[in-house]
Amino acid sequence: MLGGDLFEKLGNMQKIQEESKQRLESISIEGEGGGNLVVVELNGNRKMTRLTINTELAQMDKEDLEDLLTVAFNRALEKAEVINQSDMQNAAKGLFPGI
């Protein structure tokens, strides 16, 4: 009987995971670099949805732009990771109380 209950919970896990991905798809997370010169927006599934450069490209050299893009993306990614992990943990707690 325990095995059947466990298999049922594992079967529901895929459904819960899909629901979580859908929720995370609608969440917007921003990271910025250079005092908002570059803004990267990710969704909760860690996919880039928008990139904004708030300066004239002619005013920046290639290396500076690359650095700002990297900083902005990594900041957004760190925030998205926290949100993603939290959502997945909450979903797992519903299936397996006490985790």
Image (tube, rainbow, N blue to C red):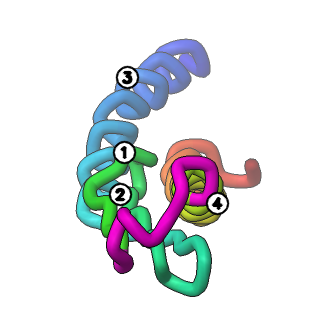
Q: 10 Å neighbourhood of mark 1: few (<14), some, or many (≥20)?
A: some
Q: Earlier in the sequence, mark 3 or mark 1?
A: 3
Residue 12 percent location from the top left of the image:
36, 32
Residue 8 location, quadrant: top left
Magenta residue span? 54-64
Query: Is residue 82 visible in the rendered structure shown here?
Result: no
Q: Is residue 99 above or below residue 57?
A: above
For the residues labelled 1 and 4, the Cα–Cα distance comes to 16 Å
Q: Which residue is mark 4?
A: 71
Compared with 18, 50 (above or below) is: below
How far apart in space, not on screen, are marks 3 and 1 (Cα)? 27 Å
**Could you tell me if the residues under marks 2 and 4 are in contact, i.e. CB atoms within 8 Å?**
no
Label 1 or label 4, whichever comes before in sequence order: 1
Pointer 3: what residue? 11
Q: What residue sits 53% from the left and 49% below the top?
A: 62
Mark 2 element type? strand
Q: Amino acid at mark 3?
A: Gly
Q: Label for residue 92?
A: none
- Mark closer to the observer (3, 1): 1
* Residue topped by disc 2: 43
What secondary structure is marked by label 3? helix
Q: Nearer the viewer, residue 6 or 17?
A: 17
Residue pictured at 53% horizontal, 74% vertical? 32
The image quadrant of residue 1 is: top right
SS class, disc 1: loop
Looking at numbered disc 1 in the image, what kind of residue is underneath it?
Lys
Mark 4 residue type: Val
Q: Nearer the viewer, mark 4 or mark 3?
A: 4
